[in-house]
Image: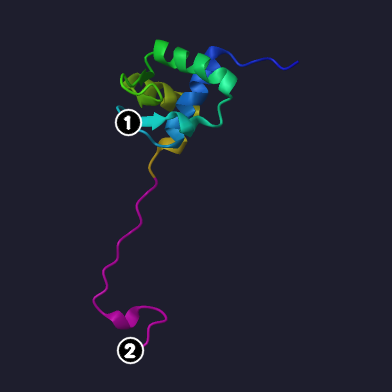
Amino acid sequence: MTQKPSDEDVGRQILGIFMQHKVRPSGTLRRNNFIDVRDADFQRGLNKAVENNWLKIKLRDRYTYELTEAGLAAGMSAGSASSFQSSPRPSVVTLTDPSVIPGREL
């Protein structure tokens, strides 16, 4: 028999999904974003995340979850920080001479 994950583990799994989606504090995700979390464990993990002040459940939509500042801090410290870092922006090059564009013949 497999051992079920703890409430804390499932709460961190939910938090990890917020980090994967690069959600900022006050940003939201809906229930359908958490398909990787077993249905049988989701409510326990969600309750733990709310108890830890990582997430808030929207008052008028119980299937929408809001990330808090504490949730972002916990998610970043849990090793999800590398997936949250923004990738460097590509350099922008402005060409004044269109003849230098490869493959373009004038």
Residue at disc 2, secondary structure: loop
- Residue 96 shows which numbered tag? none
Q: As displayed, is residue 104 above or below residue 74? A: below
- Can the viewer see residue 80? no
Q: Is residue 2 left or right of residue 43?
A: right
Q: Position of residue 103 (x, y in %)?
A: 42, 81
Q: Is residue 59 left or right of residue 87?
A: left
- Residue 27 shows which numbered tag? 1
- Can the viewer see residue 102? yes
> Quick one: which residue is furthest to the front in this view?
60
Q: Nearer the viewer, mark 2 or mark 1?
A: 1
Q: Is residue 100 magenta?
A: yes
At x 48%, y 28%, the residue is 16
Q: What amino acid is found at the position of numbered circle 1 in the picture? A: Gly
At x 41%, y 30%, the residue is 30
Q: Is residue 9 magenta?
A: no
Q: Residues within 10 Å of mark 1 (few under 14, many from 20)?
A: few
Residues in magenta, as a range: 87-106
SS majority, magenta: loop
At x 52%, y 24%, the residue is 13
The residue to which callout 2 is attached is 106
Q: What amino acid is found at the position of numbered circle 2 in the picture? A: Leu
Residue at disc 1, secondary structure: loop
Quarter of image, res 92: bottom left
Q: As displayed, is residue 1 above or below residue 79? A: above
